[in-house]
Image (cartoon, grey):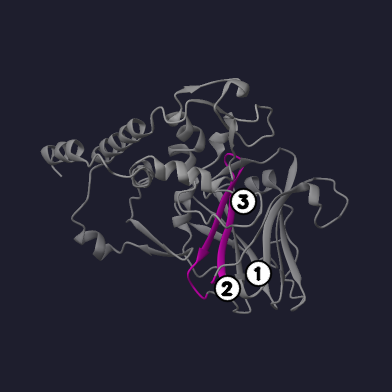
Amino acid sequence: MNREEEQTLLLEFPEDCSTLILLQLLFRYEGRQKKDGRIFKFTQHNLMKVHYETPEESEKCQSRLTEEQVKEVGKMIRSKLIEKLRNRLGKVYIEPSMKNYALPLAENTSQEGFGVLSKGSRIPIDEGKKLRAFTYWEKVNDIDLSVFALTEDGDRREFSWRTMSRHKSGAITYSGDETSGYLGGSEYFDINLPEFKALYSEYRYLIFCDNVYSGTNFSKCFCKAGYMLRDWEDSGQVYEPKTVKSAYRINCESTFAYLFGIDLLTNEFIWLNIAKDSKSRVAGDTTLSFLTEYFCLTEIMNMYDFFSMMAEKIVEDPMKADVVVTDCEIECADEIEIIREYDFEKIRALIEDAK
């Protein structure tokens, strides 16, 4: 677009554009702009396909915008959102920790499990704790848990049953390739984050994946995955329930799932829960760089930002609020509406009602 076309677009943008579409556009135009081609994600029945723009497709692209134009469109979309959402909820108390949670724009509201969050949500990892990521299965012979270290440019290193026999260290420990059979099995990784960052300093993220090596879809077996934090000096127990931060059922019509990630720079856990639309039976045969788009969602718009836009007034005392948005147990009047980080249906209803 030239400058005149850009101004026409900004002025004539449809007033009745839905809040959900505005939010999707906001993440598109305020997100990290890739320099090596666009990434297109398509989701149907909670299964995702990913297409990376080829050099030939990039050459044919007729809709390229300059960085300055992208910023202008992003600012326009944010102003439309502020105008559409303003003063919809009265007095609102918002827990500061709600800045950690992404908006549930494409979540399955029937997800089951403890600690289920919206994609891109970030949870701080306590210092001095060992992180254990685990998976457990029944009704199938073998499921593999793997970890990929990822640079910001998408370069990666695999940690799995195929590679860990050659790369053992105190930074990352693998339980071993468990193939306990149809009646049940389990695998886990223990990560010493300070040691890992020192040993593999070039990497920014860790990505955890599950794949059904037996070739059966997750929906046909029983599989749970999650993570926990443990003290450096522990009792030797494999799974201590009090330390579990998240554990959920994987039941997609696929053999491959991206579970969650870790931002090694900020020391934060990042929720993914994405099922890949494929019949992959091993990890390492797919590009992971598209996942980094989820790592900046809370920087663009998080639950704190969203409810701040909707509030007539933000109050510091939950007893004086009409709506309380929190991830904590909190004392407030019985008639006050409470919205928590996992109340996907309530949040989606607010998004869809803001016409």
Does dot 1 land on a helix, a strand or a loop? strand
Residue ID at (49%, 63%): 46
Determine whether 259 is above or below 13 in the image.
below
Q: Main secondary structure of the magenta part?
A: strand
Give the Cα distance between marks 2 and 3.
Answer: 25 Å
Spot occupied by residue 92 in the image (x, y as percentages of width and height):
52, 26
- Front residue (pair 66, 137): 137
Spot occupied by residue 217 in the image (x, y as percentages of width and height):
58, 75
Residue 223: numbered disc:
none
Residue ID at (30%, 38%): 77
Spot occupied by residue 152 in the image (x, y as percentages of width and height):
47, 49
Does dot 3 land on a helix, a strand or a loop? loop
> What crowding class fits label 2: few (fewer than 14 Cα within 10 Å), some (14-19), or many (20 or more)?
many
- Front residue (pair 199, 152): 152
Amino acid residing under circle 2: Val
Residue 144: numbered disc:
1
236 on left or right of 298: right
- Front residue (pair 263, 342): 342
Question: Which span of residues is magenta-colored?
Answer: 253-279
Does dot 2 land on a helix, a strand or a loop? loop
Q: Quadrant of residue 215?
A: bottom right
22 on left or right of 151: left
Residue 282: numbered disc:
2
Q: Which residue is mark 3?
A: 116
> What crowding class fits label 1: few (fewer than 14 Cα within 10 Å), some (14-19), or many (20 or more)?
many
Residue ID at (71%, 76%): 139
Q: Seen from this angle, which residue lies furthest front?
A: 335
Tell whether position 319 is magenta: no
Label 1 with label 2: CB-CB less than 8 Å: yes
Residue ID at (14%, 39%): 8
**Which of label 2 and label 3 is nearer to you?**
3
N-terminal label among 1 and 3: 3
